[in-house]
Image (tube, helix red, strand yellow):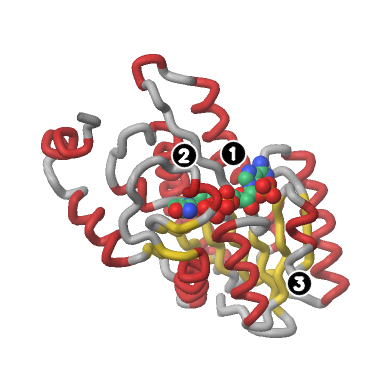
Amino acid sequence: MATVSANTTAVLITGASSGIGLALAQHYLAKGVAVIACGRNAQALQAITGATPLAFDITDSTQVQAAATKLKQLLHDNHWQLQQVILNAGSCEYIDDALHFDSALFARVIDTNVVAMGYCLEHFLPLLSRGAQLGLMSSSATYLPFPRAEAYGSSKAAIGYLGRSLRVDLAQHGIGVSVICPGFVKTPLTAKNDFAMPMQITAQQAAQAIYNGMQRQRREIHFPTKFTWLLKLASLLPEKLLVFLLAPK
Ligand SMILES: NC(=O)c1ccc[n+]([C@@H]2O[C@H](COP(=O)([O-])OP(=O)(O)OC[C@H]3O[C@@H](n4cnc5c(N)ncnc54)[C@H](OP(=O)(O)O)[C@@H]3O)[C@@H](O)[C@H]2O)c1
């Protein structure tokens, strides 16, 4: 059973100090599930009433390892079973001038969104038992080759493949994997965007969709579906037409 329920089961959420992760933490807490809320901003984590804060930087493997040691003790002391892990933390930066490609920016985004996910997998996966569900935060941006998204889109596409491949290997251990692909969600991350964000939803709506998808052990959790199905359909267009439609004019 991947479903989380009150009292005995716990969920670990990275990036719980803000945006989608914060709304997710609050959603699980409202369901009576123990939440281990992770992020760098310890103050923001402590402000989540009812959650157990665990502050660390996911890009620092030593910090992730220390967090996993604390987590193991927490699970033991509280008789919690870690039934779900949602690796949601991430960042977004855009390549403004592809001709003068910013490789430092590219490395930064890949490091936070992909390499750091590897650290979390290394140290948290051994704490999951049979029947657990792992959620990896990708993005519906991966459905189409959006302008300026070379770094962000590549990192999220990598997570999509990572999730599919992990699903194959973890099946024998009874651990399911959900790849999460939201459309636009109103958070501090998207507040920085300087372009139109059609069909944007709230972080609370996103949390509800992710919670439902995780409970149902969906392989791909994508929402809002009107928006994501439109992107999926558009991805079937010939590449030449896509370039014409998406290229900055
Ligand atoms: N908003 C959208 O429309 C949208 C759409 C598709 C996918 N996503 C993805 O959803 C996830 C959450 O995004 P959001 O919109 O909720 O953004 P957000 O409000 O900026 O939250 C990002 C979270 O990631 C954490 N984080 C970032 N770098 C970290 C690091 N090095 N170590 C530990 N934690 C780190 C931040 O925590 P601290 O600052 O405390 O470290 C924060 O809690 C991201 O992976 C994003 O790519 C968002």
Instruction: Name the residue located 24 percent from the left edge and 31 percent from the top edge.
Output: 248
**Residue 168 in view of the camera:** yes
In the rendering, which numbered label is found on residue 155? Answer: 2
Residue 83: image x %, image y %? 64, 72
Residue 185's place in the image compared with 79, above or below, is above
How crowded pointer 1 is (Cα within 10 Å; few <14, some 14-19, many 20+) is rated as many
Count of marks placed on residues: 3
Q: Where is residue 206 in the image (x, y as percent from the top left)?
A: 47, 66
Q: Is mark 1 within 8 Å of ligand 1?
A: yes
Q: Is residue 160 left or right of residue 52?
A: left
User: Residue 31's x, y, as percent?
Assistant: 62, 82
What amino acid is found at the position of numbered circle 1 in the picture? Thr
Image-quadrant location for residue 49 = bottom right
Kindly check if marks 2 and 1 are in contact, taking CB atoms under 8 A apart as contact: yes
Rendered-image quadrant of the N terminus: bottom right
* Residue 60: assigned label: none
Q: Distance between the residues labelled 2 and 3?
A: 32 Å
Horizontally, residue 215 falls left or right of residue 44, namely left
